[in-house]
Image: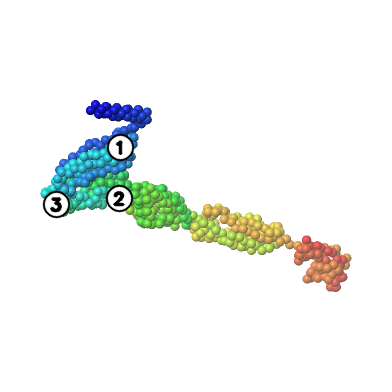
Amino acid sequence: MRKLTVCLLLLVVTASLHAQLILRVATPTRLQTVKQSISLSPSSLSFSAQNVNTTSTAKKVTLLNSSTKSLTISSITAPANFGQTNNCPSTLAASASCTISVTFAPTKAGSLKGSLLVADSATGSPQAVALSGNGVASTASVATAKLSATSLSFASQLANTTSAAMGVNLSNSGSAALTITGITITGSFTQTNTCGTSLAAGGSCAISVTFKPTAAGSYSGTLSVADSATGSPQSVTLSGAAVTAAKLSASPSSVAFGSVNVGQTSSKSVTLSNTGGSSVTISAVSVSGAGVGVSGLTTPLTLAASASAAFTVSLAPSAAGSISGTVTLTNNSATTSFQIPVTGTGVATAAASLSPSSLTFSSLSLNTTSAAQSVTLTNSGSGTLTISSITASGDFAQSNTCGASLAAGASCNIAVTFTPISSGTLTGTLTVTDNASGSPQSAALTGTGTATAEVQVTWDASVSVVSGYNTYRGTVTGGPYTKLTSTPVSATTYIDATVQSGTTYYYVVTAIGTDSLESSYSNQTTAVVP
């Protein structure tokens, strides 16, 4: 017995020594770790009695990462008869939190339990929240309300006008009548409905919504139905945008042409702009006023908001006097007939012309006057032509029947003659100074002056009594000669006017006695005609 006791003591001592050895070895290499701390609050959720196959309102659980390290979340799950949604990221930063919304949707009657589980990187994962609730088998009839749309969006609407209605149906798919306590709407929206205060099981009614904005911009509102169904009030989100009406303007706003000569056309550019907030369509263009016209504007023309287009307005008066007209643009804006006033004055003017525009006279001996050639002055304008002067320059002269003025559409004659005083080609101008455009009018004049060549032959008188002398001419020295005088001349000189320039002539003279006998040729004399 004593020996057994000693053995036991040895075992105890040995174990003690072993424990001390372990502690001594572990102490120098011990690692300090950071404990990750997270919490779920509350740690349990209890739902009140809930009808079978219906869903409760959500209850919230907050997941808080109170450590200094980020938390990796693998999954968040709810058990049967419960549901969850959350806004938790896969990685939750240190000191951050997120929310888990839990609902109770019993599928059978009785006490139902389970756990909301969060699987993560923290110690003790998964974390749990105890869930409990009581499913109740309902024997009573219930109403179930549903709206056919959750939102309505209206297209752009002119400010201060009412849109076409958009519809929403309210239906009761439950087994009991739906009591409707109110249908309300907010914002720039209005509603009418066929619902009344009660909607039978399986029934439906219509709600019509309209939009009437007061100014340009974006609008929002809510249609709400307060009733006896779970989830009341039911609601529809409303939105719409408003624009200002189209508005036409013209630059210039009126077109003033001033004075425009009759028979001529004056044009001005006009810029048409839409200064409103919605598009406008010009469907037709019309004009009034004598000579008023439009070009460069093709209809139909649609101008978007802030857009513009240029076109041309013209005035072509056909008679003298004031002109007032209008360019009218038919369109679909508030001002369906947009008008641009047009004014101007037709001015009667003369238009002068000379026909032909030039005259050519044939060669003429110096200091002789040609036969007259005619030039016609015509006033093709609509006003009286006032004639200040009609002149001819150079070796030309004129006479006329025009007087001081020429009526519109009339004409007169100007007679021009040529009297050269020097040889060669001679030019001049017929000039008419008047009040017509392009004055003075002119016609070019051309003629040729030709110098006349003569040779004067003189001789000494015969010592005998003679009755006259004959003169002869040849083109070759020594003859033959041709008699120039048809009958003897008594003078001792003869002028030969039939010579040509650039020719050399040879002359001789004979004497005729009283007995009519002719002497022999005299000595020959020579004349060179330049």
Above or below for 402 versus 106: below
- From the viewer's perspective, tell me whether residue 346 is left or right of residue 417: left
What residue is shown at x 28% (from left), y 39% (from top)? 125
What residue is shown at x 44% (from left), y 57% (from top)? 318
Q: Quadrant of the C terminus?
A: bottom right
What residue is shown at x 24% (from left), y 44% (from top)? 78
Residue 122: mark = 1
Do the residues bearing badges 2 and 1 touch, measured as CB atoms within 8 Å?
A: no
Q: Where residue 64 appears, x then y in whole percent?
A: 28, 36
Q: Nearer the viewer, mark 2 or mark 1?
A: 1
Q: Where residue 339 appears, x then y in whole percent?
A: 36, 51
* Mark 1 / mark 3, whichever is N-terminal: 1
- Three-letter amino acid code at the position of disc 1: Ala
**Residue 277 visible in rendering:** yes
Do the residues bearing badges 1 and 3 touch, measured as CB atoms within 8 Å?
A: no
Number of residues whose C-alpha sits closer than 10 Å to that of mark 2, classed few (under 14), some (14–19) or many (20 or more): few
Above or below for 527 versus 125: below
Q: Which residue is mark 3?
A: 175
Q: Which residue is mark 2?
A: 155
* Mark 2 / mark 1, whichever is N-terminal: 1
Q: CA distance from mark 2 to mark 1?
A: 53 Å
Q: Quadrant of the N terminus?
A: top left
**Residue 23 visible in rendering:** no
